[in-house]
Image (spheres, grey):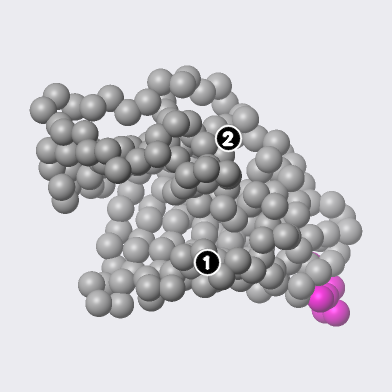
Amino acid sequence: MILPTLALVAALLSPQQDSIKAGVALASHAAEIYRGLSSFRADFVQVIDDAMLGPLTTKGRLLQSGTSKLSMRFSDPSGDALVMDGEALWVYTPSTTPGQVIKLPLPSGPTFGPNVLAWLLDDPVSRYQISYIRADYLDGSTVDVIGLVPIDKTLPFSRAVLWLGREDALPHRLELREKSGTTRTLTLSRIRTNQPVNDQSFRFEVPSGVRVVER
C-alpha cells in the first residue's frame, strides 16, 4: 500500500492550501504511481448522462496493461466488449448492433484511444490546468477530488474530475464532461494492480457469424 507523503497530506489539510499547488501535487503523485503499474484491474459502473436521452448505466470489468492494451468487457449489457490489443481497437456491441464488430486502427502517437485513465494520468501536469476541489468519501474510504481542464482544446471533453484514493493514489472514480453536453462517469471498485496478465485477455475472438467491419 502506497501512502501519500506527509508533506502532501499536510498541504491538503492546511486551511491556507493553494488549490492549484495541491491539485498539481496530487496529479503528479497519481501519475507516478500509474506509470509504475504493470497491470490495472477493476470492476466498473459507467453512467453516460445525455441531456436528450437521459442516463444510461452499464457494468463490467476493466483490464489494462500499458497504454495500448485495454479490455472493457460488459456484464450489462452482456456480451458487449471494447478491446485494444496493441494494434487495433475492436468495438463489439451486440446489444445495439448485432452481427458485426468494428475494427479500428489505433491512432498514431500516444495510442490512448478509449483508455481514459491514460488520457488523464499520462503527464497530466503538462496536459491540463489542475486544481484541488475537496476531500470526499467513496465506498467508505477517503478520496481527494481534483479537476482537470484540457490545455489542448481539441480534446472531446471540456473538463474532467478525478477521485483519487488517499491511500493508493489511484483513480476510484472519474467524470468527463464532453463538449457534446454528455457527462460520462466511471466508478471503479475491487481495484487490483500488478497482477500477472495473459495476452489472451487483450485478444478479441470474433464470434461465429459476426461480420468484421474495418474502418
Report if residue 120 is visible in the image.
yes
State yes or no: residue 173 in magenta: no
The answer to whether residue 136 is visible is: no
The x, y position of residue 202, in whole percent, is: 42, 28
Disc 2/disc 1 C-alpha distance (Å)? 24 Å
SS at mark 2?
loop
Q: In the image, residue 164 lies at what x, y percent?
A: 63, 56
Q: Main secondary structure of the magenta part?
A: loop
* Sequence order check, earlier mark of 2 and 1: 2
Q: What label sits on residue 154 in the rendered view?
A: 1
Give the quarter of the figure containing the N terminus: top right
Location of mark 2 (residue) = 66
Please tell me whether residue 15 belongs to the stretch shown in magenta: yes
Q: Horizontally, is 134 left or right of 181 in the view?
A: right
Residue at 72 percent of width and 60 percent of height: 126
Q: Quadrant of residue 132?
A: bottom right
What span is colored magenta in the figure? 12-18
Based on the displayed image, in which of its 4 quarters is residue 186 positioned?
bottom left
Q: Which of the two marks, 2 or 1, is nearer to us in this view? A: 1
Q: Position of residue 179 (x, y in %)?
A: 43, 73
Q: Residues within 10 Å of mark 1 (few under 14, many from 20)?
A: few
Seen from the viewer's position, the closer of residues 72 and 126 is 126
Rendered position, 101 above or below 117: above
In the rendered view of the protein, which quadrant contains the C terminus?
top left
In the rendered structure, the answer to whether residue 153 lies left or right of residue 205 reads right
Q: Residue 59 at x, y = what percent?
A: 33, 48
- Residue drawn at the location 76% of the way across and 75% of the way down: 19
Amino acid carrying label 2: it is: Gly
57 sits left or right of 38 in the view: left
